[in-house]
Amino acid sequence: MASLFLRRFIHTLVFSSLPFAVMVTPACAGTSELVRDASGKPMFELHFFDQGERYGQYESAEYPNVSSWTLDAAQKKAVGKAVSLWADILGPGSVNTAPVTINIGTFDDENADAGSVQNQDATGNAGYTGMAGSLILNRAAENAAQIRVGTFDFSIPEHFSPIPSTGGTDLVAVLYHEVGHALGMLSWAQEEGNQWQVKTPSLWDTHLVDQYGTRLGKNMLIVPGNASGRPGTDFIVGAFNQSGVVFRGEHVSGVLNGALGNSLPIEGFEWDIYGNLSADLSHIELERGLMSHQSYRNYTTFMEAEMATLQDIGYTIDRRNLFGYSVYGDDLTLTNTNGYFARNAAGTAYLPGQANTATLGIGLHLYGKRNDVTQVADLLAGGTAGTGIRVDGSANTVRIDPGVQIAASGEWGTGLLVSYGKEHTVISRGDIEAEGYGGIGARFDFGNNVLGNEAEYRGSWIRQSRGYSLSVTGDDDNGFALNLDGPLVKRFDVSGKLSGSAAAIYIAENAFVQNINIMAGADVSGNIVSLWNPENPDIQYTGNRADLRTALTFGLKADDTGAATVTPDTAFSMALKGGIYGGNSIDMSLAAGRLDVGTLDVHSLQNDGYLSLYGVNADGKSATVMDNFTNSASATLETAFTSSGKTIGITAASASLDGTWRIRPAASFYRDDTPITPESPVAAPTVSGQFSHVTLAAAASPTLQFTLSDDNPSAPAVTAKREADAYSRYAGNAGAASVGRVLPAIANQATGDMKNLFTALDFSAMNGNDIREGLKQLTPGAYDTVARESLDNQHEQNMLSISRLLDTSAENTCANIPPESFSGKTRCNDWTVSVHPFGRVSHLKPHGGKAGYTSSGGGMTIQAEKTASNGLSLAFDASLSDRRITSEGGYSAKTRTLGGYAGANALFKPAHWNGSYLMGIARLGIEDVELERRIAVNGYNRNHTGKWTGFTGSALAGIGKDWNSGNPEKNIAVGPLGWLEYAVVTRGSLTESGEGASKLHVNSDTVTSFSSALGMHAAFTNRTPEGTLQWNALAAWRHQWQNETLHTTAHFAGYGENGFTSATGMTGKDSLIAQIGVKATDTKGRFARLMAGSEWFSSKTASYYASVNVGLSF
């Protein structure tokens, strides 16, 4: 008869086991979920039982194992998340060939528990749980384990976290705990009559030792410590975590390394829900550990020592994948050379330099007290919610050597986490990074309680339970020192890199950090955030609450160890890439040197150096100071001002001013030669003193020149000016320069959105690159590329027509082929009509500042053609096409062209000319065009659309000669050819739609092209009774007789007097054309043609085009 043993989560509502409980096959689960490990191996199969469904049966009527309520979707997902953590931990070392079944039901107690049936080994002796037997021995057990979820006020964290992140009972962490029991962290102690004993010890039981050194064995009585037990014969167990019982094992000893007597304290006798003593023996009583039965726990997963117990009961776990190193001892001074990296495939060694990806992995954990640890190896915790260093205990010192990288690069990672105790010290000369989503560089946070903050809540001078304050001194109910009556961190000294995507430094509302010193060599990226409030009524501090504010100091000198001294460092210079937010608690000071910083929200601000403010808050200020701002006589305060004279400065409750005020133009629109009087940089009800000097900082503008026209500190005046070539000197071509030359004139009359455009240009990159690109976008050059594409489309259509004419010439049906020679109709002297769809793609590659485009599209053509016996081939065609064009080479524009075309082409090749011929092509078309032009300059983003209907046409006249092989079945024709070609495209004037000052009015234009070409042609025709296959190739040198630069004139809508002209260089004048085509025709008039060509220009660029069409002649 299988037995199911349960262990519960709550200390006060616990019973040790239900002896001889019978697990019967339950009804079918309402829903199921398969949980796989990271490699995809099926590990667990979760069966969820909804209200009224039976998930097991006990003999005891009090526990019928019928779900009393239904888990909702979020709760079921939380179960899956907890089990998935175990799947990843156990998967690589497990031997199960089928997933282990876990039944999940509900009950009405405010609790949760888990159990697993017995699963003995082949000898029938070893006490494996159902899960352990499946995972370690591959001995499958039906319904191996069950989890029951009670009626806690459960909360579900949004994401994994090393400390509890919700104020309620953390469902994921609770279930992680419960699965630990089912895996075998479970005593099989049973009560019969009034005696407790173990008839068959579980694997866990075999590692338990009482205070007299007695190991728990088979049929041994378990006797309360206050009873008359027999040491050495009975197993003597005290109460709660003072039981005297410990867990011992090889792996646990390796982790503890001499600490705690190389053994883990185990929970002893407890009171069950009926007021009776129950032998628990299934919980590890490390301080605040998740696997304990303490009323306050701030771990969401196992510590390394807890994980080692699973190895000791037989699991194969790559513990080094989860933990780099742990320190459980006290009063140690050590240098940690252990790194933390990704593991090799066998799980036997680290791969230095590669980030570990384990979820909730920890590089270094300090559990003990008063230790001094220097970290000299990299810790790369790159998994979700990974932690580089976690500090618990109390009065520990952590030193990070220069060049050492502490990185938590995964989502919700934490570089440094200080999560319990008082008076810790951290000295970082290395790199602390957490740059994944939600990452925090340095986090000072007790977190919440896994059991819910209503049960107990702790912090610096904070201890609450169910609305009442508890003592923060002495020991807690479990005999552990509270260590709450002092700052969590006494000093955090930084002279290395510190970064976090969510925050560089985060101080929680329950954590007091006394001093933070940022010194020379520091590189801080991310906000500094403090939620700590010394006025919090839950804080049990009887002294002056001002003592509880954080001193955040920049610019002190460091000693040789990296610790801050009290000496100012005039060489200090740093730009903090973020803001500082801690209005209730942060006393900020700059001791010396220079600090550039974003938005400030602090309690007080003392400036004894050069402080430059760059942020802007919701009130339009850079800094909010809740109390006093002081600028000393030797200090400089730099603030920005706008064109209206508004200063982006400081609001404070009071201020004491001296020293220098340095003013800096902010990104704004400035008119030339208009005096600006910046207002005072400090707004406070009480101000003593005033600035003794005012100076002008260099403007971060590539176009504007500012002059301090009045240096009165109380009312300074500044003027701005643009030179005539302020913009045009950065232009990349003549068209961009044309726009640049009109901008200074427009600036003096700019209104509305035009001011925004000037602001974007005037405060763009100092090297002028943004202006160079912006000017090109502002020109109407995109219209030039569309015109060029239309001309090229005419040229490519003409090349297709040449190919068709040469095919006809080579075939020479009427002249050479008697009608009776081949099957099918001859079409000599007859008109034939064909209808064929076509597709086309073309690309003109931009090069050396010249523009280009990519065009693709398709359409339909209908054609009537006739080959006469006198050598005349004549064709008429009409087509519709749809083309999509993307402008390239600096013009951000997309165009759609819908075109309708009609054309005629002819080739005259009489027999008596001996292969010589004349050819001519003419085509006219109408094109409906829509161009979307996109402007993106330094944050100025606008879209404009131009629409027009234009005309296009082309004409080509050519001459050539073919020498034919004379074989009617397989004819080869080779010869020279040349032609003259003219094309034209027109566009009427238009005004673009779309909001914004960059909208253009574009003047009408006509663009023409005249070229000549000379080259060679070759064709091969193969006739069979089934049809005809033709190949042709052409190569020619083409010369463009007109200017290769296209021009379009335009002006900004509303600024008609300031016109400009584009100058879009497209390609060189000389080019080499190469074209090849193939056509297949069957006897029923069906055909397919593929043609591809390229044109290489002397300007070292090229265009490519291809066309395919299929059709039917009738």
Image (tube, rainbow, N blue to C red):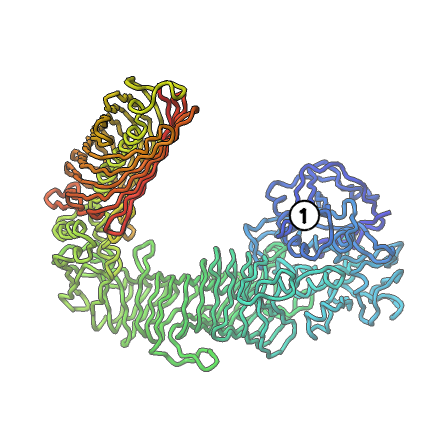
Q: Is residue 990 visible?
A: no
Residue 727 in the image: state x and y as whole percent: 17, 55
The quadrant in which residue 355 appears is bottom right
Residue 184 in the image: state x and y as whole percent: 75, 56
Image height of 825 relative to 706, above or below: above
Relative side of 649 to 143, left or right: left
Q: Residue at x 47, y 75 (%)?
A: 402
* Secondary structure type for disc 1: strand
Q: Residue at x 16, y 33 (%)?
A: 988
Residue 271 in the image: state x and y as whole percent: 77, 57
Relative side of 1016 to 459, left or right: left
Q: Residue furthest left?
A: 1057
Task: Name the foreground residue: 450 vs 657.
Answer: 450
Residue 716 in the image: state x and y as whole percent: 17, 65
- Going by the numbered disc 1, the residue's amino acid type is Pro
Which corner quadrant holds the C terminus?
A: top left
Q: Which residue is mark 1?
A: 42
